[in-house]
Image: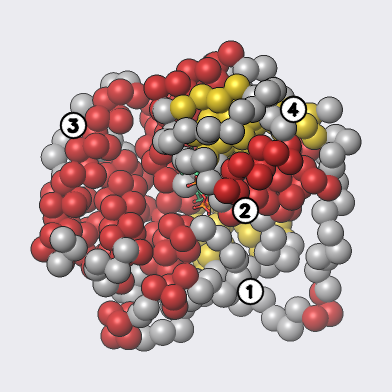
Amino acid sequence: MIEIGVLGSTGSVGTQVLDIVRKNKDKIKVKLLGASKPSETLLSQIEEFNPDYVYIENGNISKNLKNTQVFIGKESLDFLKDLKLDLFIIAIAGVKGIRPTYILLESNKKVATANKEAIICLGELEKGKYKNIIPIDSEHSAIFQVIDRRPLDDIRRIVLTASGGPFLNLPLEELKNVSIQQTLNHPRWSMGKKISVDSATLINKGFEVIEAHYLFDIPYEKIDVVIHPESIIHGMVEYIDGTVIANLSNPDMRIPISYAIFYPERKYINNNYLDFTKLKSLNFLSPDYEKFPLLKVAIECGKKAGVYPTTLTMADEVAVNLYLQGKIKFLDIYKIVIEVVESIKDYSINNVQDLLDFIDYVEKYSLSVAKKYGSS
Ligand SMILES: NC(=O)c1ccc[n+]([C@@H]2O[C@H](COP(=O)([O-])OP(=O)(O)OC[C@H]3O[C@@H](n4cnc5c(N)ncnc54)[C@H](OP(=O)(O)O)[C@@H]3O)[C@@H](O)[C@H]2O)c1
């Protein structure tokens, strides 16, 4: 029996993790569930999976749970250090994933993560620890599956594919009036709101470049991005002899999730197999950096390192939240992120508390910058 914990169990990735569990009840036992609040979804998951432990950041669970110990508030997260599970899955969205990721990495737990924001912000602080992580992000799972512990010296470059998002074919002038609904309407993937907006601005791909840099310990010069609207190829590795090995599948997050849980084994998921005779064509384009400048800004932040990846992540999180609340327009996300990144003051980050303090500072600063764009 594989004993797992799922932090962020109520979200898009988390619920798909639990789908995999349902199909493999004889092989996987959920010991820990975690979410931000005691929602109906979380309560019904507790009833269904009867975990030993539940974590919520806010609120209370009034229902009397006989077999379940409940931990409340981020200060309680240290309980993770003492849990002996086979795998901890982090499916939390945004920078709230930093603290649990840090605790789990520091206590040498086996982690599978979808939470790119934590990897980007922890960055240099946890360097050396990322080799204990199995990636869930489909592009990183693709690269992980191709590399599979082969020497990095043989690699000329890795290529992360991007669908191009909902606005791939929309002229730049029309981006100023796009609705939230249009932005969330991703052509290939059904995901949580934050990552859907990030996919529409393409900053998500920039985040993934930084994530790949840390997860695979590979220099930025060896990471390329290509737009591939069909989302059939998720990642490619080009070797020094000219061979390219690609990872292909229909877009379905349950594939990388299942691979992360059962690694190195593979298990049947559903009948969602590729029919090559129906794939009319696979297209590849260069990213349009004029229409999607945040992709370039993100890669530059990654290369500059220091405070930049964290500043980028938090400025974007603030701007995306304001956009989702209807307080700013789509192109204001660009303006806020660029202004915050260009004007951020240097800050010395030597430990995780410094990082969390810096994040609070960037949040406040980003909100003050956002006021210019009518966010208040
Ligand atoms: N969705 C995808 O297909 C996909 C693909 C690749 C990578 N990712 C990455 O995976 C992560 C999750 O994305 P998602 O789309 O699944 O997000 P989502 O649908 O918005 O779900 C977010 C989850 O995080 C939980 N959460 C938020 N704050 C928390 C906190 N402070 N403590 C504990 N749990 C907290 C939420 O709980 P509540 O419900 O209680 O708020 C929810 O369970 C993101 O980093 C994203 O970039 C997602």
Kindly report the distance in space between the C-alpha atoms of the residues bearing marks 3 and 4.
Answer: 40 Å
Q: Which mark is residue 138?
A: 2
Decide: few, some or many residues near mark 2? Use Cα within 10 Å; few <14, some 14-19, many ≥20: many
Read off the residue under disc 3. 347
Q: Are marks 4 and 1 in contact (CB under 8 Å)?
A: no
Q: Earlier in the sequence, mark 3 or mark 1?
A: 1
Please tell me whether residue 333 is drawn above or below residue 28 in the rendered image.
Answer: below
Is the shortest distance between ligand 1 and the CB of mark 2 under 8 Å? yes
**Residue at (30, 30) in percent of width and height:** 356
Q: Nearer the viewer, mark 4 or mark 2?
A: 4
Amino acid type at image mark 4 = Glu
| Image coordinates for residue 348, horizontal then vertical, percent | 21, 27
- Residue name at image x 71 percent, y 45 percent: 18
Contact between marks 3 and 4 (CB within 8 A): the answer is: no
136 vs 316: above or below: above
Query: On the picture, is 235 further left or further right than 309?
Result: right
Q: Secondary structure at mark 2?
A: helix
Q: Position of residue 352 (x, y in %)?
A: 34, 24
Q: Secondary structure at mark 3?
A: loop
Q: Quadrant of the N terminus?
A: top right
Q: How far apart are labels 4 and 1 at the CA level?
A: 35 Å
User: In the image, which disc is placed on residue 3?
Assistant: 4
Q: Residue furthest top?
A: 82
Q: In the image, is residue 251 above or below residue 363?
A: below
Query: Closer to the N terminus: mark 4 or mark 2?
Result: 4
